[in-house]
Image: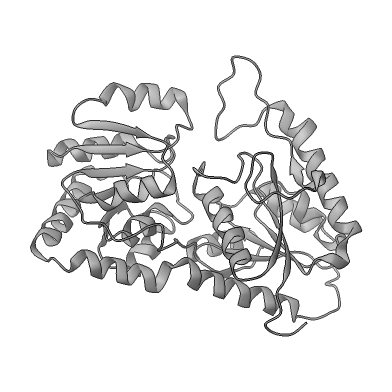
C-alpha cells in the first residue's frame, strides 16, 4: 500500500440512533461527517449502523436492528430497552463475524460504538482498529479493552480533557477534536435573537439558557431533539411563548441558517462535556458563543475568537459575557468574519479529515507483530 492509496475502512457507528440527517446528536453528526468526508476523498467506507442510516450498503449483516421500545414507554437517551441486548448487540456480533471472515478486504476499523463488544474482539478480527473516545470514562469500555488479546484497539480522544480522563483509567489516546463542515455552517449576518441548540436533556440544561435570555431581555430560540420528555415537560415547555420559542429538530442546513442569523449562541452544559460540538458550529457561522467552562469546552474557547466562558451554573456571568460579545459584534462589522476565520483554521472538517487519514496511516505503518496482552 502506498502512502496515498485509498483505504478500505469499516466504520462502526453508535447503535442508539440511525446515522442520518437531521442528526440525533453530536456523536451521530461526527460519524456521519466522517463517513461522508472519507468517501469524498476516495476511500472505500463500509458502515455498520442501525437500519435507516445513510451510507448503508446492500450487505444485510452490516445493518443493525433499531431499538424497539415497549408500548407506552418513552424512549430516553440514557437507557436501553431489552431489544438492545437481545437483538442489537447480537446483530453487531454477526457484523463483526463478517468483518473477520473478510478481513483481507479491509485495511482498518474506525470504531465509534459505545458498547464494548468491538473493543473486546479487536485482536481477533484481523483488521487494525482505532476507537474514538467521545464520552467520559466508561468502565464497561475500559474492561472490554482490557479483556482483548492480540493487537488491541488504538484510541483517539475528542479533547485533551477527554484524553486525560481516559489515561487515568489506563487507556492512552491521541487528541483529534471534532470538526464542522464550513460549506454547511456558513457565515451568517447575525440578528437580535439568542439561540440555544442541542439535545434537550438535563445534562445540556437549556432551562438555564432561558434564564440568560430573560436577564438580557432578548428572545431565545431553542432547537434540537427532545431526548428527555419529562425534563422538557417540566423545564422547557412551560416557558415557551413570544420570547422563548421552540423551533424543533432541524436539518443541518436549517440549523446553520438559524444560528447564523442569531446574535449569540448560549451553551449551558451541566456535565463535564467531552467536547461540545455546538460551539464550533456556531463559531463557523460567525456567531459568538458563551458557555459554562466545563470539560473540553474550555479548550474550544481558548483556541477560538468570539467565545467566552463563565463558571458552571453562573447565569449572571454568562449573561454578562453574552452582552459583551453582542456589543462587540454590533460595534465591529468584521468581528463575525474573524470568528469564522478562526473556526475554519481550527475546526474545519476537511482539515480534520486530513489529520484523520494521517493517523490511520500511522497506525497501519506500525509494528506488524500483534501486541500480546494478558487475558
Q: Residue at x 44, y 59 (%)?
A: 296
Residue 181's spot in the image, x, y percent?
Answer: 45, 61
Q: Residue furthest left?
A: 331
Q: Residue furthest right?
A: 101
Image coloring type: one colour
Q: Residue furthest bottom?
A: 2
Which quadrant would residue 71 be assigned to in this image?
top right
Q: Residue at x 33, y 55 (%)?
A: 282
Q: Nearer the viewer, residue 21 or 232?
A: 21
Identify whether 225 is placed above or below 284.
above
Identify whether 334 is placed above or below 121.
below
Q: Residue at x 25, y 45 (%)?
A: 314
Residue 164's spot in the image, x, y percent?
Answer: 54, 64
Residue 374's spot in the image, x, y percent?
Answer: 86, 63
Residue 278 visible in the displayed image: yes
Q: How many marks?
A: 0
Residue 98's spot in the image, x, y percent?
Answer: 86, 52
| Left or right: 297, with 160 as reference point | left
Q: Residue at x 34, y 26 (%)?
A: 235
| Left or right: 314, with 117 as reference point | left
Identify whether 299 is placed above or below 58.
below
| Left or right: 118, with 354 as reference point | right
Q: Residue furthest top?
A: 72
Quadrant occupied by the N terminus: bottom right
Quadrant occupied by the C terminus: bottom right
Residue 311 visible in the displayed image: no
Amino acid at each position: 500500500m502506498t502512502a496515498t492509496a485509498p483505504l478500505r475502512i469499516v466504520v462502526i457507528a453508535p447503535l442508539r440512533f440511525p446515522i442520518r440527517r437531521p442528526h440525533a446528536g453530536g456523536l451521530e453528526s461526527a460519524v456521519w461527517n466522517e463517513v461522508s468526508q472519507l468517501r469524498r476523498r476516495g476511500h472505500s467506507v463500509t458502515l455498520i449502523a442501525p437500519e435507516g442510516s445513510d451510507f448503508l450498503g446492500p450487505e444485510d449483516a452490516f445493518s443493525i436492528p433499531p431499538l424497539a421500545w415497549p408500548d407506552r414507554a418513552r424512549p430516553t437517551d440514557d437507557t436501553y430497552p431489552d431489544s438492545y441486548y437481545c437483538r442489537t448487540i447480537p446483530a453487531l456480533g454477526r457484523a463483526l463475524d463478517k468483518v473477520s471472515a473478510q478481513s483481507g478486504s479491509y485495511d482498518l476499523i474506525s470504531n465509534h460504538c459505545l458498547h464494548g463488544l468491538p473493543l473486546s474482539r479487536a485482536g481477533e478480527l484481523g483488521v487494525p482498529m482505532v476507537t474514538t473516545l467521545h464520552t467520559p470514562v466508561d468502565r464497561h469500555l475500559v474492561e472490554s479493552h482490557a479483556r482483548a488479546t492480540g493487537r488491541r484497539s488504538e484510541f483517539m480522544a475528542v479533547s485533551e480533557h477527554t484524553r486525560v480522563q481516559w489515561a487515568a483509567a489506563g487507556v492512552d489516546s491521541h487528541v483529534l477534536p471534532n470538526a464542522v463542515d464550513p460549506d454547511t455552517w456558513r457565515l451568517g449576518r447575525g440578528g437580535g435573537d439568542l439561540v440555544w441548540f442541542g439535545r434537550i436533556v438535563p445534562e445540556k440544561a437549556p432551562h438555564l439558557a432561558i434564564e440568560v435570555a430573560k436577564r438580557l431581555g432578548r428572545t431565545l430560540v431553542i432547537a434540537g431533539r427532545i431526548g428527555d420528555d419529562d425534563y422538557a415537560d417540566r423545564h422547557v415547555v412551560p416557558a415557551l411563548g413570544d420570547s422563548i420559542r421552540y423551533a424543533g429538530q432541524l436539518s443541518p442546513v436549517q440549523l446553520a441558517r438559524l444560528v447564523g442569523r442569531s446574535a449569540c449562541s448560549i451553551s449551558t452544559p451541566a456535565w463535564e462535556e467531552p467536547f461540545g460540538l455546538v460551539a464550533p458550529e456556531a463559531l463557523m457561522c460567525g456567531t459568538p458563543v458563551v458557555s459554562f467552562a466545563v470539560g473540553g469546552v474550555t479548550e474550544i474557547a481558548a483556541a477560538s475568537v468570539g467565545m467566552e466562558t463563565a463558571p458552571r451554573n453562573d447565569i449572571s456571568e454568562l449573561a454578562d459575557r453574552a452582552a459583551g460579545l453582542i456589543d462587540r459584534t454590533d460595534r465591529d462589522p468584521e468581528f463575525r468574519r474573524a470568528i469564522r476565520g478562526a473556526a475554519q483554521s481550527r475546526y474545519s472538517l476537511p482539515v480534520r479529515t486530513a489529520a484523520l487519514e494521517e493517523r490511520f496511516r500511522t497506525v497501519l505503518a506500525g509494528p506488524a507483530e500483534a501486541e500480546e496482552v494478558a487475558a
